[in-house]
């Protein structure tokens, strides 16, 4: 029986060999470089789990399977490798659905392994029986059902291949009795696509458009990060002298210290980015699907340039022109496409060459104006926020303005940091303050928008990149959904720093009650214990911050404890109940009532 070496130095059996299906499954994991799996142990896959350790695979037990799938997502996004999650059939698998949906919209190569009820009991309503393929059909790129134990390696390997080629989650569904027996199997060699820049004709057309552009602007999307294409994006931007805006929640797609960086579009994004893209005559959407939520009006600005020519580059041809009308669509890898366009523009005289200095001045001025506004924007200024600020001054305790807190956190961010943000009002406002120098640094729940995302995701990212500081942001509502995973971080020595904004409310939804329902608050208020205290009870450090000048030092101390002592810290920051702008104002309408008993509820 021969062996072959994997890229990470382990060995897998080579050629057709006699083995058990469990061995075929585990050997296929090894062939694909799997070293970490997130989940909760279970009898449904125990035979395979028994040989994880000698194969060099660590199963990281979690508190809840949703957390496991989020960890796999964070692991994949931080590393560019597969994130793997597994659970007990039935409830252990159904617990993963929300997190796999989040991974789908983040285009994360997560593989979920779903052991299911045994074949002889299917359809009888047995213990923990469920039809598990339909659960994930909307949120996976490929689903493999092992219909015969002899196909274990083939179908498992294909799920790993497709997660990379399709850039998203895949599922391997395995009847639990199919782990046993004797089979003849060959472990497949992983297949990876050799991607291209796109068609020559579309690249030529894009280059011609750019050669005539007078004010080109680049939207750097998540595809730039996934393609490891930041350097090529920088080169294209520098050739054009083009301002670069990050697509929504991809603040790590272009280095923030670069003079051409202008910040993110979309909800609570950068006014500088919006001001500059509104002037564009040609927009290059590089690795972006131009999702609807990321191009909505914001800060009172309907900034998308209606008359600009749009060049869209995406690895998935189905995204081209889906949301925005485009003039040139390029189905290609963001890194290679940017490189190809830069090569085509080399040595050519461009219309924008004559305006390079003027555009640089306008870019710098827009950025300076936005930074000044952010620094002066110490608190929200709407009537409701002013009212609750006044109330806070009369309350016991010291409550901080969220915007000032976010600015202080921004100043204290360490180099090479990874930050995950949850869903919520303060987390959304944080979009204006989070800046990064390198890719695979910013993790957010993207379009699925589920609460409870940030903590488990940053634990997964830290597992993949233990040398990098790892920080999560969550409001108190979302935090309560996943704070139990502090136990995972502590138990398994995966130190992270968790920032909790304690403002005693479901802020994002409560803002709609302010704007549309005359401040009739239903189920929006939260009476909380000390989250720092709960963190300490789970074995983490806990810090409560009630003074603005303590925010930055507290974050620095927590990060030092993480990186030097391997300590997890819950950093609880006491915030006022003021609220930033809502996600979108067109999602609701002013209430109308016809029945007498409800006439006052308008």
Image (cartoon, rainbow, N blue to C red):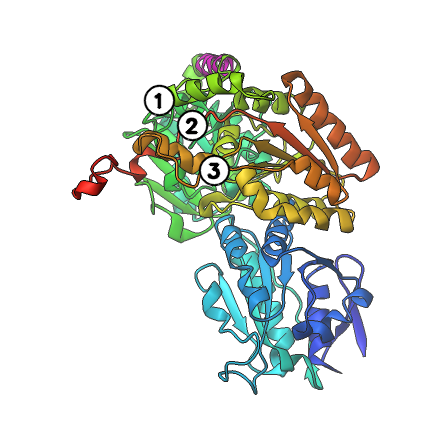
Q: Which mark is residue 506?
A: 3
- For the C terminus, the image quarter is top left
* Residue at horizontal 71 percent and vertical 35 percent from the top: 469
Q: Which mark is residue 343?
A: none
Q: Earlier in the sequence, mark 3 or mark 1?
A: 1
Q: Which mark is residue 279?
A: 1
The overriding secondary structure of the stretch rendered in magenta is: helix
Q: Residue furthest front?
A: 597
Q: Is residue 224 visible?
A: no
Q: Are marks 1 and 2 in contact (CB under 8 Å)?
A: yes
Residue 269 lies, in percent from the top left, at 46, 28
Residue sitting nearer the eye, 127 or 23: 127
Disc 3 or disc 2, which is closer to the eye?
Answer: 3
Disc 3 or disc 1, which is closer to the eye?
Answer: 3
- Label 1: few (<14), some (14–19) or many (≥20) C-alpha neighbours in 10 Å: some
Q: Which residues are magenta?
A: 361-373
Q: Earlier in the sequence, mark 3 or mark 2?
A: 2
Against 402, residue 33 (above or below) is below
Q: Which mark is residue 217?
A: 2
Q: Is residue 532 visible?
A: yes
Distance from disc 3 to disc 1, alpha carbons, whole Å, reads: 37 Å
* Residue at horizontal 64 percent and vertical 82 percent from the top: 177
């Amino acid at each position: 029986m021969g062996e072959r070496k994997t890229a990470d130095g382990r060995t897998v059996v080579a050629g057709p060999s006699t083995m058990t299906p469990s061995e075929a499954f585990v050997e296929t994991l090894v062939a694909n470089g799997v070293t970490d799996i997130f989940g909760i142990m279970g009898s449904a896959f125990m035979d395979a789990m028994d040989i994880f350790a000698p194969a060099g695979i660590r199963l990281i037990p979690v508190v809840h399977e949703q957390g496991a799938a989020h960890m796999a997502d964070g692991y994949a996004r931080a590393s560019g490798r597969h994130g793997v999650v597994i659970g007990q059939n039935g409830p252990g698998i159904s617990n993963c659905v929300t997190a796999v949906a989040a991974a789908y919209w983040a285009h994360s190569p997560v593989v979920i392994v779903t052991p299911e009820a045994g074949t002889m009991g299917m359809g009888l309503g047995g213990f923990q029986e469920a039809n598990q393929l339909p659960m994930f059909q909307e949120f996976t790129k490929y689903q493999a059902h092992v219909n015969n134990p002899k196909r274990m390696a083939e179908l498992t390997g294909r799920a790993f291949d497709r997660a990379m080629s399709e850039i998203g989650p895949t599922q391997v569904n395995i009847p639990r009795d199919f782990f046993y027996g004797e089979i003849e199997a060959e472990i497949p060699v992983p297949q990876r696509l050799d991607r291209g820049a796109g068609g020559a004709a579309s690249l030529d057309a894009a280059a011609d458009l750019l050669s005539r552009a007078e004010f080109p602007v680049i939207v750097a999307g998540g595809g730039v990060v996934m393609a490891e294409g930041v350097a090529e994006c920088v080169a294209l931007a520098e050739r054009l002298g083009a301002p670069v805006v990050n697509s929504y929640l991809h603040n790590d797609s272009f280095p923030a210290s670069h003079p051409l960086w202008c910040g993110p579009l979309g909800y609570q994004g950068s006014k500088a980015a919006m001001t500059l893209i509104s002037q564009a005559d040609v927009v290059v959407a590089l690795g972006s699907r131009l999702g609807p939520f990321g191009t909505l009006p914001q800060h009172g600005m309907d900034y998308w340039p209606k008359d600009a020519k749009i060049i869209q580059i995406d690895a998935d041809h189905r995204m081209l022109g889906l949301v925005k009308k485009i003039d040139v669509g390029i189905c290609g890898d963001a890194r290679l496409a940017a490189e190809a366009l830069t090569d085509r523009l080399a040595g050519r005289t461009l219309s924008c060459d004559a305006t390079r200095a003027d555009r640089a001045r306008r870019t710098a001025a827009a950025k300076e104006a936005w930074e000044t506004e952010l620094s002066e924007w110490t608190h929200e200024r709407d009537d409701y926020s002013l009212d609750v600020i006044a109330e806070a001054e009369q309350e016991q305790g010291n409550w901080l303005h969220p915007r000032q807190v976010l600015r202080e956190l921004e100043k204290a961010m360490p180099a090479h940091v990874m930050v995950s943000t949850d869903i919520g009002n303060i987390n959304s406002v944080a979009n204006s303050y989070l800046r990064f120098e390198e890719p695979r640094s910013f993790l957010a729940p993207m379009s699925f928008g589920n609460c409870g995302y940030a903590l488990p995701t940053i634990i997964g990212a830290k597992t993949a990149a233990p040398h990098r500081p790892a920080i999560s942001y969550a409001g108190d509502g979302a935090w309560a959904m996943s704070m139990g995973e502090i136990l995972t971080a502590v138990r398994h020595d995966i130190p992270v720093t968790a920032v909790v904004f304690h403002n005693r409310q479901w802020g994002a939804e409560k803002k709609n009650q302010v704007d549309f329902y005359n401040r009739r608050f239903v189920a929006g208020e939260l009476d909380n214990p000390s989250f720092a205290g709960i963190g300490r009870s789970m074995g983490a450090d806990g810090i409560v911050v009630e003074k603005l000048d303590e925010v930055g030092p507290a974050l620095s101390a927590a990060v030092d404890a993480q990186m030097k002592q391997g300590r997890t810290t819950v950093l609880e920051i006491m915030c006022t109940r003021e609220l930033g702008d809502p996600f979108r104002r067109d999602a609701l309408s002013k209430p109308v009532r016809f029945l007498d008993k409800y006439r006052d509820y308008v």
